[in-house]
Image: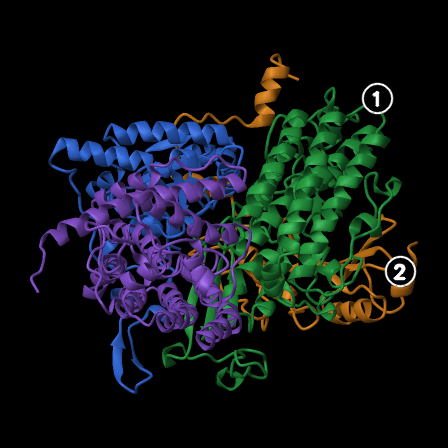
Amino acid sequence: MHPLYERLKHLFPLDEVTEQRPDLLFVTLPREHLRSLLLHLRDIEGFSHLVLLTAVDWIEEGQFQLTYLLHNRPKAQDIGVRIKLARDSATMESIHTLWPTAATYQRELREMFGIDFPGSPGVEEDFILEGWIDLPPYRRDFDTKKFSDENYNHRPGRETHDPAEYMKQQLYPNGL
Amino acid sequence: MQSKDFSKAELQKRTVTGPDGVEFEVDPMRDYFCEAPPTVMPPAYIKIVEDLFNWARAESIWILGFGTGCGAIEMRPLMTPRFDAYRYGIQWRPTPRQANLFVISGYLSVKTLKRAIRSYEQMQNPKYVVGLGSCTINGGMYWDSYNTIKRLDDYLPVDLYITGCMPRPEALLQGFMDLKKVIRAGNAEGANRYAENFAWYKANQKQIIHDWDMPEYSW
Amino acid sequence: MGIFDADRSQYPTPGPDGSLDIDLTSGKYLKLWQGPNHPGITGNMSLELIVCGDEVVKGTTHVGYLHRGFEKLMERRTFIQCFPIVCRICVPEPDFNEYCYAAAVEELAGIQAPERANWIRTLILEMGRINSYLMYLGGQAGAFGLGVIAQWTTYVRDLMLDRFEELSGARIYHMFILPGGVRDGLPDGFEQRMEETLREIEETLQQVYDVMFCNAVFKKRAVGLGYVDPAWIEPYGITGPVARAAGVANDVRKDQPYLVYPELDFEPVIGHDSDLYTRADVRRRDLLLSVDLIRQILAGMPSDGPLMAEIPSVLHWRIPRGETYIRGECSRGEYGYYLVTDGSGYPRRVNVRGPSYTHAVALFERLVVNVNISDVAALLVSLHTYPPEIER
Amino acid sequence: MSFDWMKIVYALLTLFIVVNYGMIITAIFQKIGARIGRRYGIPVWQNYADLIKNYGLRSSITHGTMFYLGPVFRLTGGVGLLLFIPVIYGSEIFSNFSFAGDLILILYFVFFGTLGMALGAAESGHPYSAIGITRGLSQVTASELPFALAVFAIALQYQTLSVTEIVAAQQGGYLNWTLFTNPLAVMAAMLSFLGSMMRPPFDVVLAPQEIPIGPPTEYHSSYLALMQTNRMIFPIAKIAVYVCLFFGGAVSWPIFFLKVFLIYFVSVFVGVVFPRFRVEQSIRWFLIWGVPIGILAILVA
């Protein structure tokens, strides 16, 4: 197993671990240990660069996955920390005190996924959208095509085919 | 969901104390925005004067320097040695007051559309709009996006579309040449069309821009 | 203290949490908006500046004018349908989107791109880097009112676009690097025409150096402006030339070599003063480095071999559940794609990590404080931000 | 003393010639700038088209009385300056309204336009206008200092306040020009000249990338056209002052055109290859380089 994982597994209750590449490790962690793990990684393991913070909507499982991706430049190592949140009333503690730049990511997540980060600077303000009236758009249950059809006037004449269906008809006219 | 309240604190009516200690009332909605709707401006009465003006308008096209989308990237080549649009009397103005031509360079997100309309309304009659790229015509690549408009001519009076994704500078030059013909023939009356159908345009704009800090009346 | 230094006592003092209490009605401050319709702003974004006299007390970046929801759109497109739209995320340097997306899909699908395709990919990425830097040099000089540099650099950039055109058929959106390989090989005589273009670029860069970097007025304005403390690099996630100008050899091409970079001979360009002038100089030298790399690539490229790996039929292309992150060094810094798949024919989630995201928002808001209003545009340009990659 | 009404007609003729010359010379200089950027450049008649178009715009909004008067004041500055200098020395027709103390009036008119602009721009209410005009006034004040000093120096040198007499004193060979008799004053004045031409490195007032585009931000249609007209007249008028005071005047139109072109070219030559100063840098530059030379010129005289 990955040497980094060997060092971490005694300290933190890591769940699912994926070694994607020799230099990229993903670990899953209960949410209450996030801050201590990030501090450990930043200050002791040298993962001092927050590459990104984003979310994935696993709507089937009723969960949001938050991914904190950290990078250790001297060792050329990346680690992604996965946190699972319940999809309804999703809130998470803010890490803007560890990395000031995380505030921007948290603003975006709040707007695009509806995940709240209480205490993060400016998290209440509009970041990208303005006057948004529907579900947060990056959630899986928000259908962008439906929204676009309902709200915008389309110019007639554009024929849309479901590409898979269309190509099936083109390639296999007699059925698969 | 439509009833969401977008009123902002800085736009509320309030009493402020000036630096000299005098108190006065501020109503930003009324004080900061012009309330007069645009009016139709007829062409000059004498034909030869109008023709002269149309010639000058065609020969001196001042573009508003507002790159709304990716099309803005081809603007710099357009103004530099290889394509050099200055040869045709085309130049950039940084302020909408002095510009005549608004090039919508690509898709408009709703947030930009609001600014684009404001900029357009600040321009002086006669003014022209050129839509650049497929995305202004029918949404192009972003036909199913939740944040971009699909037909520009519902919101602003478009004089000319230039197709492509993205249009090459040659296409832009050709488009400007065509626009010149339209102007010289006296057919570029987009501003008057906008004034005549103001209610229709506003209704279209209102349909998608939900957060609009303008007085209710010009809505 | 010089006679023109401002009296700091009239400025607001930040509260314990760093927030400023600014009373705009006091008449002491003026709120200014720069952009989105402003010639000094790179692209379509806006800055909300609160100034006191000539100096900025507080600056806020507002983005979102270019948001098209790519990350959402890709969730409802198949893997191959995503390929033509990814390049539209970052307009001035689209190739990195194509490469990162292709590499992420290849990794999760277990496809190995052929050797020759990797060489061509590297070539394209370096060509795109040159374009981007040429654009930057013009913009940086233009922000100080030196318009002639933009004319020269855009002229040679057009020559580079010609090379792109003969390679891929398009000037801006090349759509050349697709998952599995590249679309085509090099056309006949490409090396020779490329060499001519490179010579022209070097010549122009020499002139740019003479007129811009040796110019007393440019130095007077640029030296010492916008100092980025090396201690900020980690907290603010600074990468690329901004970090290299601060003396940190932060270059993904060297740190985590991808494509054929391990076979090329180069050293990351670094500077030491970390001000606007150094950043411009680092980018100029990096441009020369790219010229050199292109020569090495053309010399080392295998002349034949497959260009595309076998990819599954696009109708049945499913990728098993997994997630990965691919990074590359674009002209602004670290560019990365975070791709999550769920076993279906569509990506579950794509997240684009552009360097401008941190540079233009958190870092810029920090840097702009106490900067003279004349220098705001130049400062923004010196971070080399492209708004479309902030909001996608 | 009876007033000669024909003088008004003659002055208008001068104005006409200068406006057209200004239109063409400006276009030519833009073309030269374009050639340095490897471009072809605008057609020579471009300025006429721009002007007609701006006069021909149908709508024009206003921000108040002073908004109207700003461009008018500005134009008055240019025209007034022109009317009180003997453009062509020795010519009955083109010596305009020059009189004994006109040097003082000229100094005043050089400044007048900017002051008028300040009123108009302030009324327009755009923050960038306000910033631009603050910059404009500070820079004009700083750049006027060396010019004023140079003018005092040559007034002392020639012991007169009449431009016509100063020109007369310079006739009879190159070596009689102030350029050679009092090089320090000319140097100070030329430094000031660079500052007043609104070209880099001293174009802080317009500075499109910083404060688009300063005082005229809100101006448009016929207001802008008036200001454009002034931009054609004012530089030529200002250079005409320089020709008269420092470069031996002009005895015929071709000589006038040639001298104006060459002097104008100095500012263009400097302008194309320099970025712009910040406003305090430019003020400092005038105080450090211009003023001492001007004081030296007075001491020498």
Q: Position of residue C181 (x, y in %)?
A: 76, 30
Instruction: Specify whether B62 is left or right of A45.
Output: left
Mark 1 = which residue? C304
Task: Tell me: residue C57, above or below residue B73.
Answer: below
- The kind of secondary structure element at disc 2 is helix
Report the disc number at residue A4: 2
Q: Chain of mark 2?
A: A
- Colour assigned to chain D in the rendering is purple
- Colour assigned to chain B in the rendering is blue
Quadrant holding the C terminus of chain D: bottom left
What type is the residue that disc 1 sits on?
Asp
- Camera-side residue of A81 and C292: C292
Q: Chain of mark 1?
A: C
Task: Tell me: residue D298, above or below residue C88.
Answer: below
- Camera-side residue of C62 and B206: C62
Residue A55 shows in this picture: no
Mark 1 neighbour density, 10 Å: few (under 14) some (14–19) many (20 or more): few
